[in-house]
Image: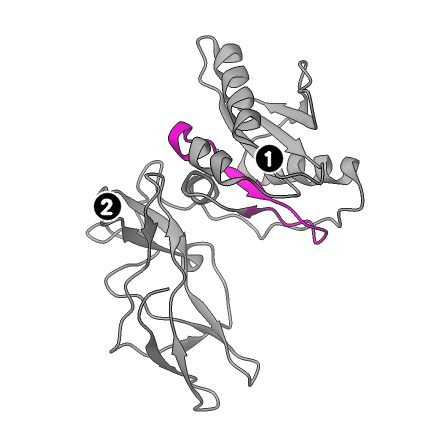
Amino acid sequence: MGPTVPIRCPKCGREHAYAPPPYPCACGAPVTPPMSRDAKAEAVTDRTWADEWVTARCEACGDEGHWPQPELDCSCGAVLRVPVAGTTGVPPGHPGHIPLPRTAPRPRPAFRPVTIRDARDAVTVAALYLRWLGYLNTRSAARRPPSGSRIAARGMLAQVEPALRPTTSRDVECLWLTAMTEAGDTPVACAFFSLAGYTSGARTRADSLGVPLFTMDATGTPQPVNGAAYELVATGA
């Protein structure tokens, strides 16, 4: 965690010491959005897709990516949007009404989770999430993996692993190789959804291959866990 900054709640006046969470860049280095000590926190009343993201540059590789807008829950019940220095939902230097290709977030409604009770529910949630990202016409993939299930859509091959073991680097490599094999003349991206999470080797391998990794739990809302996943959520299909 980085250095803390004082955040005062505009509703109750309570002051909090806040440290922003680091996010994993695709190069493997942590990216921490720079905090603003001068701006005041705002209570979140309305949400838009653009307001949910900030841009921050990785000091290790120089890449600029989109990351979740830092927020803080006050004990009075207010949700505070924490100011970030020099970053906005659209990269600086460009008019807010002209989105950048491949990096600007696309407005979309909030994802509606589905409770996960078994493996079938996990596959259903992953398919719905892919459609939410813009990958339509999802279906079961023709080639089944050694474990779990695969979902195919135009331009996407996803694997869902409901087993109670962490996903390994071999699992990630097999998915990536299958996507490359099936790509032909049309590029096919791939993504992994796991209920038990990932080994450190799997995360490292996914970062090197650019494979988005998501975790799922009983609440039914996939969570991105690496830089490629955050970018996929930001850009969509």
Range of residues picked out in magenta: 207-223
Q: Position of residue 216 (x, y in %)?
A: 64, 46
Q: Does residue 210 show up magenta in the picture?
A: yes
Task: Judge whether residue 87 can be spotted in this image.
Answer: yes
Q: Quadrant of residue 75?
A: bottom right
Give me the residue at 48% from left, 15% from top.
Answer: 180
Q: What SS does tag 1 mark?
A: loop
Compare residues 128 and 107 and report the one nearer the observer. Answer: 128
**Mark 1 or mark 2, earlier in chain:** 2
Left or right: residue 116 versus residue 27 is right
Compare residues 163 and 78 and report the one nearer the observer. Answer: 163
Give me the residue at 57% from left, 81% from top.
Answer: 77
Q: Does residue 76 show up magenta in the picture?
A: no
Mark 2 closeness class: few <14, some 14–19, many ≥20 residues within 10 Å: few
Is residue 184 shown above or below 83? above
Residue type (three-letter) at the residue carrying disc 2: Ala
Q: Position of residue 66 (x, y in %)?
A: 36, 49
- Disc marking residue 116: none
Question: Cβ–Cβ below 8 Å for labels 1 and 2?
Answer: no
Residue type (three-letter) at the residue carrying disc 1: Thr
Give me the residue at 47% from left, 72% from top.
Answer: 72
Q: What SS does tag 2 mark?
A: loop
Q: Which residue is mark 2?
A: 60
Q: Which residue is mark 1?
A: 167
Task: Judge whether residue 155 can be spotted in this image.
Answer: no
Using the numbered discs, state the Cα–Cα distance from disc 1 to disc 2 in whole angstroms: 27 Å
